[in-house]
Amino acid sequence: MSDRDQIRQEKIEELRKQVANDDSTATVDDRNEPIHVESADQFNDLLAEDGVVLADFYADWCGPCQMLEPIVEELAAETDATVAKIDVDQFQQLAQQYRVQGVPTMYLFDGGEQVEQMVGVRQKDELRSLINQYA
């Protein structure tokens, strides 16, 4: 087992214990809130592990991003998609890798492959419809 796999297993066990303490009916796979990406590796792991991932590249100073925030949160709670939020100021290299030129920019991934790109604020129904096409 590689160091990375061992760390991943330890994190999973840590999360299971934390979830068990918070809510005995929840599971580690319950993702009803957006995941705030903390590293490029974490984002790559999300893409590798999950079927449909909505990646929201945002900035705290961005007004349209703030308008989109409640929509993104609702989609995380209401759909089976994993919703990942990536701060472009904190992860400039990741934003460059995905050619983010303006915020908000959202990508939809299915099975690790990019299937949609959206720039600007979108309506909740439009985003839900796109997610459901791949879910």
Image (cartoon, rainbow, N blue to C red):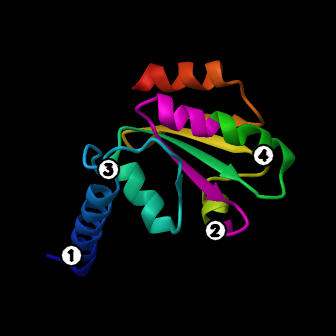
SS at circle 4: helix
**Distance in Å between CA atoms under marks 4 and 2:** 22 Å
Q: Residues within 10 Å of mark 2 (few under 14, many from 20)?
A: few
| Label whose residue precedes the other's in the sequence (4 or 2) | 4
Which kind of residue does numbered mark 2 sit on? Gln
Q: Residues within 10 Å of mark 1 (few under 14, many from 20)?
A: few
Examine the structure image and report whether residue 90 is included in the region drawn in magenta: yes
Examine the structure image and report whether residue 24 is included in the region drawn in magenta: no
At x 39%, y 26%, the residue is 135
Asked if the residue at tag 2 contacts the one at tag 4, i.e. Cβ–Cβ closer than 8 Å, the answer is no
Q: Position of residue 78 (x, y in %)?
A: 49, 28
Q: Is residue 66 above or below residue 89?
A: above
Which residue is the site of mark 3?
Answer: 23
| Label whose residue precedes the other's in the sequence (4 or 1) | 1
| Label whose residue precedes the other's in the sequence (1 or 2) | 1
SS at circle 1: helix
At x 77%, y 45%, the residue is 65
Residue 124 is left or right of residue 8, and the answer is: right
Asked if the residue at tag 2 contacts the one at tag 1, i.e. Cβ–Cβ closer than 8 Å, the answer is no
**Distance in Å between CA atoms under marks 1 and 2:** 27 Å
Q: Position of residue 26 (x, y in %)?
A: 30, 45
Which residue is the site of mark 1?
Answer: 6
- Number of the front mark, 2 or 3: 3
SS at circle 3: loop
Comparing 96 with 108, the one in front is 108
Give the quarter of the image for residue 15: bottom left
Which kind of residue does numbered mark 1 sit on? Gln
| Label whose residue precedes the other's in the sequence (2 or 3) | 3
At x 59%, y 41%, the residue is 107
Residue 93's tag is 2
SS at circle 2: helix
